Image: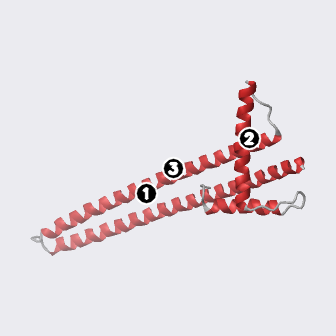
Amino acid sequence: HPYRSKERGDVWNHVAINLNGFDHPKFQVKNISTRDRLTLLITKNKTDMRQEENASGIACEETELDQALKEIIDKEKLASEKGSEAKKKEKEEKAAAEELRKTAMERLGHTQKRNSEGESDRAQAKKSRRRSFDEKHESESDQRKEELELKKIEQQASVELQKQQHDMMKLFMQQQQQQTQILLSLLAKKN
């Protein structure tokens, strides 16, 4: 979920509730404090790893906490990449729908122009009037069909987008639960 979004806040609230539900070790935290604590752990871990690597010149041995934090960072990157891909796809679908809408409007404009040219030529007999009425009726029918097709395409795109968002939300919730369990197991081992 994007930063500062309601969904992201709900996920952190869920993590805090899970932590507060444990009897051993006992937690008394809020969603903001859990988020801040994780951010602090990540930044501290990055600086420690960088300092150790600079001091020794070789890759440092990772602890279980380091590995868990690295896994959390990777999952967050993966989720943000999927979110940006979904936004890109949504943008492309909107552009395609807009292009289709423009095409439909161009056709309507051409038919209106053709109909107005037919009306200006009133020198023809009653048959031509009837023919122009039939053409107008046919063009309106074609226009309705195009509009219905456009609505159908937009609805399909909307349903697909909602499905993708639901799947992403589900994946993110699973990742958050896994991260919570990893942190709890690490905290339990420390105590």
Q: Mark 3 sits on what residue?
A: 88
Q: Residue sitting at 84 percent across and 48 percent down?
A: 186
Residue 143, x across and y down, in percent? 35, 66
Please state which amino acid type lies under the numbered disc 3.
Lys
Out of 109 and 178, give the one closest to the viewer.
178
Quadrant showing the N terminus: bottom right
Relative to 26, is 40 above or below?
above
**Residue annotated with mark 2:** 45
Give the number of callouts.
Answer: 3
How much space separates mark 1 and mark 3, taking CA atoms? 14 Å
Depth check: give the residue in front, 179 or 37.
37
Give the class, few, some or many, for how many residues have Cα within 10 Å of label 1's Cα (few <14, many ≥20): some
Amino acid marked by disc 2:
Asn
Q: Is there any visible trace of residue 175 in the rendered image? A: no
Tell me which amino acid carries mark 1. Ala
Q: Position of residue 35 (x, y in %)?
A: 70, 55
In space, the residues marked 3 and 2 are separated at their CA atoms by 33 Å
Q: Which residue is depicted at the point 74% across and 41% down? A: 45
Could you tell me which secondary element the residue under label 3 belongs to? helix
Q: Position of residue 94 (x, y in %)?
A: 45, 56
Q: Where is residue 148 in the image (x, y as percent from the top left)?
A: 43, 66
Q: Nearer the viewer, mark 1 or mark 3?
A: 3
Residue 14 occupies quadrant: bottom right
Q: What element carries label 2?
A: helix
Between disc 3 and disc 2, whose residue precedes? 2
When the figure is inspected, residue 81 is found, relative to residue 107, above or below; the finding is: above
* Farthest-out residue, top: 57
First reached walking from the N terminus: tag 1 or tag 3: 3
Would you say 128 lies left or right of 164 here?
A: left
Q: Quadrant of residue 109?
A: bottom left
Residue holding disc 1: 97
> Is the C-beta separation of discs 1 and 3 under 8 Å?
no
